[in-house]
DNA sequence: TTTACAAATGTAAAATTTACACTTATTATT
DNA sequence: AATAATAAGTGTAAATTTTACATTTGTAAA
């Protein structure tokens, strides 16, 4: 970037304002029915007892990605989480304590594979996106942005699988996409569409827990799957 | 956001690191043929004489949007510019002078309607996106991200018009979209598609500068145009 | 009046999306 | 052993959208 009025031979930006930078994470999970987010009950003032996204301050030696990874590990115990930067929120009074700018990341995790201990320790809870309580600061706005981003991303890239167990049924997959977009799909059309994408492998195993007949398990195949560009066009159809 | 280990009754985040926050702008223009970006030649060290995006530091009392607006006015003389946040770049060494985190915004302007004085004053220059020189720091990466975002946005919302004069011909509009996506469209299909969107009005005037017959001028109709969600589906077609 | 040239225009084929209902496999019940 | 119950699995025709493609039109200059 360019300092506007400086020709300082020491090459430092000494006269510029510094700010606190935070990272907040919208952690999405899927319980088989609803798209959920992980929230924590704030243990300190201000807004003690209110629900909030998980977050933390950026440290000097960290990138935002590193900080988000650290925060996700802190609250879930997980590494290697799918993550995407959403937006940076900078309203001057967004945090009443002190001017803080926050970059939001959304993350997708398998709701059954994170630390129960940590959940307890942080008074964390999963909430359906549609039934979540009001959050502190501008966190509701962050969630809305994250959801929009997730929907757009999931429409063009095969990311939903991060929310499922490694092996899943067609029904689970369909339920997931229905949850993401808050819509219903026709079962046959869904299967045909997914199969035409050629990105999941049908296994020989069946899940016998939901029906007498059992349903085949599938597995995401990262090899076969390559991301593709949005096709040019579609201005307001 | 949440301070991880603090229960400070003064409610200040006193022990956290503060950083410099900058805003860099990818200013897109369209000259009738190519999608262009406005770059300035850095007048100071480090990297003096190299090409760079326009940018500036965020001030205490500003939001990022305000800062981007200020920077755009500073370098173009324009207000009310279409703008979208792209991403925040935070590699620790991205700026060799000092740790600086930068939020990129792209902006769309009519290339013929900005201040020529300022262009001269800042040794600024328009470059075709495909022929731009290498930029300082991580600015090349910013441009690539901005371009991707612009392409995706233009595919689902009628934003391209900000790059054109108020009245434009079908040919100009087609050339613009061809430039944005670096592709060619069939003229008849393009016209049909655009007309089916019902977002521009045909005027009674003609532009007589490019042919003997003249070509009708059109105007964007913001009323008729409403943004629409991406349709569910399209996982890697 | 002829020429030159970009602008304007329509249709058929192909591909994709949508709507829609019955059969199958298995277990539990009788 | 037969039957009932239930979710899983499956195909096709119609509608819509996208794509491919060539001729006519209007005007000014020659």
Image (cartoon, coloured by chain):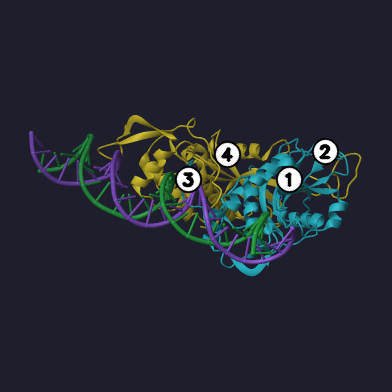
Chain colours: A yellow, B cyan, C green, D purple
- Sequence-wise first label, 1 or 3: 1
Q: Label 1 belongs to which residue?
A: B128
Tag 2's secondary structure?
Answer: loop
Instruction: Evaluate whether residue A103 shows in this view.
Output: yes
Whether callout 1 and callout 3 share a subunit is answered: yes
Q: Label 3 belongs to which residue?
A: B234
Vertical order, A109 against B121 (above or below) = above
Picture quadrant where residue A168 is located: top left
- Sequence-wise first label, 2 or 1: 2
Residue C28: x, y in percent?
Answer: 19, 39
Residue D6: x, y in percent?
Answer: 24, 45
Q: Label 2 belongs to which residue?
A: B97
Determine crowd level at label 4: few under 14, some 14-19, many 20+ residues with C-alpha closer than 10 A.
many
Tag 4's secondary structure?
Answer: helix
**Residue at the bottom extreme?**
B204
- For discs 4 and 2, the disc positioned in front in the rendered view: 2
Circles 1 and 3, Cβ within 8 Å, touching? The answer is: no
């Amino acid at each position: 970037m360019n300092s506007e009025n400086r020709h300082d031979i020491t090459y430092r930006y000494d006269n510029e304002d510094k700010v606190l930078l935070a990272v907040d994470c919208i952690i999405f999970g899927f319980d088989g029915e609803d798209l959920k987010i992980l929230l924590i009950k704030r243990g300190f003032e201000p807004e003690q007892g209110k629900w909030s996204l998980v977050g933390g301050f950026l440290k000097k030696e960290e990138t935002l990605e590193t900080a988000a990874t650290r925060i996700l590990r802190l609250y879930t115990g997980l590494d290697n989480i799918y993550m995407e930067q959403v937006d940076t929120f900078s309203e001057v009074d967004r945090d009443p304590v002190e001017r803080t700018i926050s970059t939001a990341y959304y993350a997708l995790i398998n709701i059954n594979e994170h630390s129960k201990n940590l959940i307890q320790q942080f008074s964390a809870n999963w909430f359906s996106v549609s039934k979540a309580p009001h959050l502190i600061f501008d966190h509701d706005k962050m969630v809305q942005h994250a959801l929009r981003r997730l929907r757009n991303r999931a429409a063009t890239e095969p990311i939903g699988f991060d929310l499922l167990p490694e092996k899943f049924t067609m029904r689970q997959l369909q339920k997931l996409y229905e949850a993401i977009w808050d819509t219903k799909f026709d079962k046959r059309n869904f299967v045909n569409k997914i199969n035409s994408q050629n990105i999941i492998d049908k296994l020989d195993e069946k899940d016998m827990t939901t029906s007498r007949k059992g349903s085949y398990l599938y597995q995401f195949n990262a090899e076969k799957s390559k991301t593709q560009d949005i096709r040019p066009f579609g201005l307001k159809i």
